[in-house]
C-alpha cells in the first residue's frame, strides 16, 4: 500500500472541477485518507516547490500556487503514486493523453489543475508538508 499527495491547484478550484477530480480517484478505487482546503502563502509555495528553485518558471509558479485556495489530499492505494500520475496526464496538457485530468481541464503547462508526488520519498515529504499523522485516516 502506498500514499501520495494530490493537490487541486487554484485553477482547478476556480474552474469548479474539485468534484470531478475526486470522482476520478474514487472511480479507480483510490482511497482519500486526508483532505483539506488551504491557501498557501508565497513563502509556503516557494518551500513546497524548492526543488524547482533554479527553474525560470519558479517565480511565476509560486505566484500562481499562492494565488487562491487549493485542495490538498492524501491518496492511498496500491501503486497509487504512478496511478495518480497516469490519471493526471503529462505536465503539459497539450501532450497529455486524452481522458486525463490535465488533457480535459488544464489550460497551459503552468496552470495544469493538479499536482501529484512523483516518487515514494517525495510523497512522504510532501504529505508531511501539509498533514500531521492525526489528520490521516485509513478507511
Ligand atoms: P509535474 O507537476 O507534472 O510533476 P514538474 O514537477 O516538472 O511537473 O513541474 C512542477 C510544476 O511546475 C508543473 O506542474 C507546472 C510548472 N512547470 C513545469 N514545467 C514548466 C514550464 N516549462 N513552464 C511553466 N511552468 C512549468
Ligand atoms: Mg513534479
Image: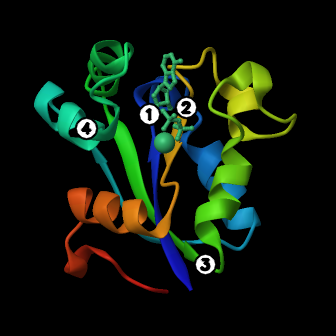
Question: Marks 1/3: CA distance?
Answer: 22 Å
Q: Residues within 10 Å of mark 1 (few under 14, many from 20)?
A: many
User: Circle 1 sits on which residue?
Assistant: 9
Most extreme residue toward the right is 98
Residue at 69% in and 35% down: 90
Residue at 50% in and 19% down: 110
Tag 1 and tag 3, C-beta contact below 8 Å: no
Most extreme residue toward the front is 54
User: Circle 3 sits on which residue?
Assistant: 77
Q: Residues within 10 Å of mark 4 (few under 14, many from 20)?
A: few
- 4 or 1: mark nearer the eye: 4
Please report whichever mark, 3 or 2, sits nearer to the chain's N-terminal start: 3
Please report whichever mark, 4 or 3, sits nearer to the chain's N-terminal start: 4
- 4 or 3: mark nearer the eye: 4
Ligand 1 under 8 Å from disc 3 Cβ: no
Ligand 1 under 8 Å from disc 1 Cβ: yes
User: Circle 4 sits on which residue?
Assistant: 50
Please report whichever mark, 2 or 1, sits nearer to the chain's N-terminal start: 1
What colour scheme has been applied to the protein in the rendered image?
rainbow
**The N terminus sits in image quarter:** bottom right
Q: Which mark is residue 113?
A: 2
Please report whichever mark, 1 or 3, sits nearer to the chain's N-terminal start: 1
Q: Which mark is residue 32?
A: none
- 4 or 2: mark nearer the eye: 4
Tag 4 and tag 2, C-beta contact below 8 Å: no
Classify mark 2: helix, strand or loop.
loop
Amino acid at each position: 500500500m502506498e500514499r501520495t499527495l494530490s493537490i487541486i491547484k487554484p485553477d482547478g478550484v476556480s474552474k469548479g472541477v474539485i468534484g470531478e477530480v475526486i470522482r476520478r480517484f474514487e472511480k479507480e478505487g483510490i482511497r482519500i485518507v486526508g483532505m483539506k482546503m488551504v491557501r498557501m502563502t508565497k513563502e509556503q509555495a516557494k518551500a513546497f516547490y524548492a526543488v524547482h528553485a533554479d527553474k525560470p518558471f519558479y517565480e511565476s509558479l509560486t505566484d500562481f500556487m499562492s494565488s487562491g485556495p487549493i485542495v490538498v489530499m492524501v491518496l492511498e492505494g496500491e501503486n497509487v503514486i504512478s496511478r495518480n500520475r497516469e490519471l493526471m496526464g503529462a505536465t503539459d496538457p497539450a501532450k497529455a493523453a486524452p481522458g486525463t485530468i490535465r488533457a480535459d481541464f488544464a489550460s497551459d503547462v503552468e496552470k495544469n489543475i493538479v499536482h501529484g508526488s512523483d516518487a515514494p520519498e517525495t510523497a512522504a515529504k510532501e504529505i508531511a508538508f501539509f498533514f500531521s499523522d492525526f489528520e490521516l485516516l485509513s478507511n
